[in-house]
Image: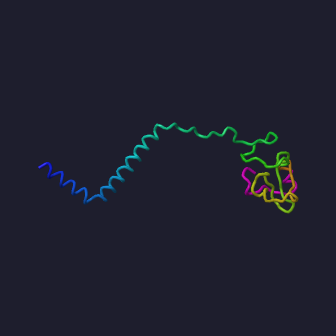
């Protein structure tokens, strides 16, 4: 009786070999995924990134942008405008970077730029 049962099981396995292979692959992939998930608990936790200096200070005035000016002249003079324009910018603002060097006018303060007839640029954060 037991040998007859094993013979039937053997025939069934031979007839369903492709389906059994697919089921075995799915089972092993699931088992491996579960194991990797459990292992990830044991991996060391990463430290979060900390920003220690988030403010930029030029001549004692704290500016809201963390991007720094790219030229030495921009550090000495805080604001720049175009000879042909009507707005002043921080030197690292997108609008200021589009101004040709030959057309740049530098100002020490906002008041100086406004006395010259310029207004704050709308696309420059912090003005």
Q: Residue drawn 15% across and 50% down?
A: 3
Q: Main secondary structure of the magenta part?
A: loop
**108 part of magenta stretch:** no
Q: How far across and down, in percent of the image, does residue 90 sit? A: 78, 51
Locate residue 10: give its quadrant: bottom left
Q: How far across and down, in percent of the image, does residue 77 sit? A: 85, 48
The colour scheme of the drawn protein is rainbow
Q: Does residue 46 sit above or below 85 in this rendering?
A: above
Q: Residue drawn 71% across and 46% down?
A: 66
Front position in the image: 33 or 96: 33
Give the total number of marks visible in the rendering: 0
Q: How far across and down, in percent of the image, does residue 60 sit? A: 80, 39
Q: Is residue 124 left or right of residue 112?
A: left
Front position in the image: 43 or 52: 43
Task: Identify the residue at the far bottom of this view.
Answer: 84
Locate residue 103: give its quadrant: bottom right
Magenta extent: 112-127
Front position in the image: 87 or 57: 57
Q: Is residue 48 left or right of residue 21?
A: right
Q: Is residue 3 left or right of residue 116?
A: left
Q: How far across and down, in percent of the image, does residue 44 sit? A: 51, 36
Q: Residue drawn 73% across and 57% down?
A: 123
Task: Identify the residue at the far left of this view.
Answer: 1
Q: Is residue 49 left or right of residue 95?
A: left
């Amino acid at each position: 009786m037991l040998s007859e049962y094993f013979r039937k099981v053997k025939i069934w396995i031979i007839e369903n070999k492709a389906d059994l292979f697919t089921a075995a692959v799915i089972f092993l992939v699931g088992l491996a995924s579960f194991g990797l998930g459990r292992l990830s608990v044991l991996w060391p936790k990463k430290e979060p990134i900390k920003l220690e200096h988030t403010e930029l200070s030029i001549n004692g005035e704290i500016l809201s942008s963390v991007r720094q000016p790219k030229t030495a002249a921009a550090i000495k003079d805080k604001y720049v405008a175009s000879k042909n324009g009507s707005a002043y910018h921080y030197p690292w603002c997108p609008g200021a970077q589009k101004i040709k060097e030959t057309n740049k006018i530098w100002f020490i303060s906002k008041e100086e730029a406004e006395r010259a007839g310029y207004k704050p640029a709308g696309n420059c954060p912090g003005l």
